[in-house]
Amino acid sequence: MALLDIIRHRRSVRDFIDKPVERDKIMLCLEAARLAPSACNSQPWKFIVVDDLQLKDELCRAAFGGIYSMMSFAKKAPLIVAVVSEKAKFLERIGGLLRDTKFYLIDIGIAAEHFVLQAEELGLSTCWIGWFDEGAVKSILKIPRDRRLDVLIAVGYCDESKRGQLHKRDSLKEVTAFNSYDGTGA
Ligand SMILES: Cc1cc2nc3c(=O)[nH]c(=O)nc-3n(C[C@H](O)[C@H](O)[C@H](O)COP(=O)(O)O)c2cc1C
């Protein structure tokens, strides 16, 4: 499939069938993530793949309790990836402070989306999850206290009978301009 077709086909999938994800497919997704660009080539990420079903269930119980219980759909995913933000390089941190920009969040966002698109190309489905109990997951996965865990990615095979439509997107006209903020390109 061409890249744009993969992008058009991708949805956030919240209904997974009971089928494990092959390790070699996950390795390809990780390779795609590894090759992502990052500010100062800082590569401030580590991907923890949770495919041990017992551990994954424990993680989901901890991650999606109480105010996070809306995300319990993720318990059906056979695999969860925790996207850990590692310490960025000194130059990226200084640049980020001066610019008041969290470059590391941009970096992990790109890397995680590389992962997601490669997964899609391999016939897998995913859902980004930002609403979860970070402290509880960090403790289960033994992630050092000074690291952030901003997103999880649920991965599995879509229950095609429940695949949703693409959520509405703003039109190209609304989100683009040429040569100035209001430029129409005419
Ligand atoms: C950074 C980020 C965090 C997200 N967190 C959640 C989440 O906690 N729970 C959830 O169900 N979906 C989550 N999503 C998925 C979005 O809701 C979804 O991408 C958006 O509604 C567009 O739908 P689509 O992905 O199907 O095109 C998240 C997406 C991103 C990029």
Image (cartoon, helix red, strand yellow):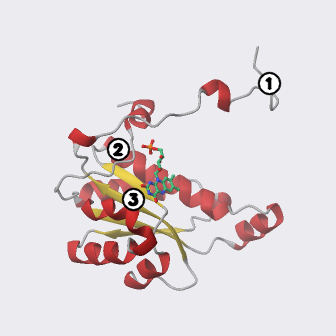
Tally of numbered tags: 3
* Circle 3 or circle 1, nearest the eye: 1
Q: Which residue is mark 2?
A: 120
Please determine whether, in this image, residue 135 is positioned above or below residue 149: below
The residue furthest top is 186
On screen, residue 34 versus residue 119, left or right, reads right
* Circle 2 or circle 1, nearest the eye: 1
Return the x and y of residue 24 as percentages of the image width and height. Answer: 25, 57
Q: CA distance from mark 2 to mark 1?
A: 35 Å
Q: Earlier in the sequence, mark 3 or mark 2?
A: 3
SS at badge 1: loop
Name the residue: 48% across, 51% down.
Answer: 113
Name the residue: 45% across, 71% down.
Answer: 67
Q: Nearer the viewer, residue 129 or 22?
A: 129
Return the x and y of residue 166 as percentages of the image width and height. Answer: 42, 35
- Badge 2: residue crowd in 10 Å (few <14, some 14–19, many ≥20): many
Q: Is disc 3's CB within 8 Å of ligand 1?
A: no
* Circle 3 or circle 2, nearest the eye: 2
Kind of residue at disc 2: Glu
Q: Which residue is mark 1?
A: 183
Snapshot quadrant of residue 105: bottom right
Kind of residue at disc 3: Leu
Q: CA distance from mark 3 to mark 1?
A: 39 Å
Name the residue: 33% across, 72% down.
Answer: 60
SS at badge 3: helix
Q: Nearer the viewer, residue 41 or 105?
A: 105
Quadrant where the N terminus lies?
top left
Q: Which residue is mark 3?
A: 30
Snapshot quadrant of residue 69: bottom left
Residue 106 visible in the picture = yes
